[in-house]
Amino acid sequence: MLYYEPQSTNPHFNLALEQHLFDTAYARHVFMLWQNDNAIIIGKNQNTEAEINRQFVEQKGIKVARRLSGGGAVYHDMGNLNFTFIVPDGDDINFQFFCRPVMQTLAQFGVTAEIRGRNDITIKGKKFSGNAQYRKSGRVMHHGTIMFDSDLETLQAALSPPAAKLQSKGVASVRSRVTNISEHLEGGITLADFKSALAKNVLPRDFEIYMPDDADTAAITQLHDELYSTWQWNFGASPRYAAQKKRRVENCGTLEFYLDINQGKITGIECYGDYFGDRPVSQLASLLHGCQLRPEAIAAAIAHIDLGEYFYNLPKEIFIEILCEQGDANELADFNRNVK
């Protein structure tokens, strides 16, 4: 078995490292213990905008990263420990197989844990570990979180998007009560103590330390640069969804935008309200068709137009802010009727 403890706490780099090991360590079993600093990790099939409180995340400098596996969004910080297994697939390979060492390690410290549902590990009914898997070409990568002493207030705020008028085709996370392992331990046991004990419970006597060479580092860096650190992967890869943005702007009126978003890009805009304008919004929609739903992209697309021709007294920065905000209203059950 190969064992590795990466020094990086950058989620984009560590996810690239995971994929590199999955793609290259064909005949080897791999075990990795690693940490990310202040990050939200999105499941492969999720809509990023529906999972995060983007304003809070941006204010706090929390990185957003999409992983290869499915499942729900999780929060990482330096009070959280991540574990990864990469092994050949087989009939006896399931979620419990990989979660058992975590439970055994906790038992050594006098804490009883159990598996709830398909992929959560809990203590007294509260979740401290979420797990996900990725399978391909006869291999399985299983990775999970272990909240030892995470900032639960930040976790809650970062993973609590406003109740936007957003109808997503992505897989939504299931919110559940959470806990830190540290709350259930006695005797000053640290994350380092737990990490060491978990490694001993997993690693065989003849394990080998993984030592990436220059070629490995170059390949991991390329994956980081071309995929995991890109907006297109972390936000643009979200499934198609529709959203409503509404605001009253002084001296302009009430604006209610209906957006259709596909792969993180605007594919349709309609606007209703009591505003004044000389040009039809359909012309503006054509200009923004295919534009990424992020401030800098919209700013570049409308840099050379007079927005006042469409909306009297609407500053460009306010227009951009409205389109990019997450909203503050309830879901629309009939949303698809309103967005053409």
Image (cartoon, rainbow, N blue to C red):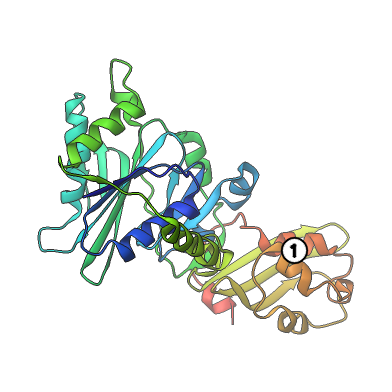
Residue reaching furthest to the front? 214
Residue 51 can be seen, yes or no: no
Residue placed most toward the observer, 121 or 125: 121
Residue 105 can be seen, yes or no: yes
Residue placed most toward the observer, 9 or 71: 9
Residue placed most toward the observer, 33 or 146: 33
Q: Which residue is mark 1?
A: 320
Residue at 49% across / 56% down in the picture? 65
Judged left or right of residue 291, residue 103 is: left
The answer to which image quadrant residue 124 occupies is top left
Judged left or right of residue 67, residue 120 is: left
The answer to which image quadrant residue 114 occupies is top left
Mark 1 lies on a secondary structure that is helix
Looking at the picture, how far across and down is residue 266, in whole percent? 63, 75
Looking at the picture, how far across and down is residue 127, in whole percent? 31, 40
Residue 166's place in the image compared with 65, above or below, is: below
Looking at the picture, how far across and down is residue 157, in whole percent? 53, 42
Q: Quadrant of the C terminus?
A: bottom right
Residue at 62% across / 66% down in the picture? 244
Residue 234's place in the image compared with 78, above or below, is: below
Residue at 51% across / 42% down in the picture? 38
Judged left or right of residue 179, residue 111 is: left
Callout count: 1
The amino acid at mark 1 is: Ile
Residue at 40% across / 66% down in the picture? 45
Residue reaching furthest to the left? 92
The answer to which image quadrant residue 235 occupies is bottom right
Looking at the picture, how far across and down is residue 161, in whole percent? 53, 51
